[in-house]
Image (cartoon, rainbow, N blue to C red):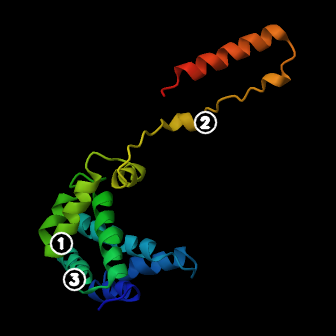
Amino acid sequence: MISRDQVIPLFLKGVPSFQDRWQRHRVAWKGQEAGDFNDVAEFAHHLVALYRSGDVEEVRKGLALVERVIQEGDASARSLASIGVLEDVQNIASHYSFGCRVFEQWLGDGSRGIWHTLEHVWKGETHLAEVVAQEQGRKLRLRPWWAFWRRKPVVDLEEIDDPELRDIAEGLIRRERSSKPK
């Protein structure tokens, strides 16, 4: 059974062209642990770069290794291969004109099932928060990006000495409360 610790060595041995990218990744992290998902994300980036450069044989080998991890790995290794590599390949490739569908031809049976599950989970969603909410059976209502910078003023009516100004503030607060959906 392939363990989590064996995944990167397997990718390095099976796809020798990954060595250079891996070394740059290790240097960028200055010897610190980047985390398993960051590590396998480098492999996903490498697979997309290989496709872009026309080296489809290396892509085929890489995806065959991902299939092997899915078939022979323990739960944590399978998670790295599916969420860490396949989902990242889908996301990374979506930024290019060729898209992610070009990789489907090299997927094994296990990888293909996970690939389609990931597509189904992400269908119509653009944010991870939306996917998590959907998995939990909740509806997420995302606020526009600019809404995070618009803070609602906090009014302490006890600090307003002027009775006319206090009446205005109370009216605004009542209006705001009555306009909120219940």
Residue 177: image location, x then y, percent: 59, 23
Horizontally, residue 35 falls left or right of residue 106, namely right
Q: In front of the other: label 2 or label 1?
A: 2
| Between 179 and 86, the one nearer to me in the picture | 179
**Residue ID for mark 2:** 149
Q: Residue at x 60, y 36 (%)?
A: 149
Position above or below: 128 against 117: above
Q: Nearer the viewer, residue 38 or 180?
A: 180
Name the mark on residue 71: 3
Q: Residue at x 31, y 75 (%)?
A: 81
Which badge, 2 or 1, comes first in the chain's sequence?
A: 1
Furthest-bottom residue in this view:
1
Q: Residues within 10 Å of mark 3 (few under 14, many from 20)?
A: some
Q: In this view, does 154 lie to the left or right of 27?
A: right
Q: Mark 1 points at which residue?
A: 56
Crowdedness near tag 2: few (<14), some (14–19) or many (≥20) residues, C-alpha within 10 Å: few
Q: The N terminus is located in which quarter?
A: bottom left
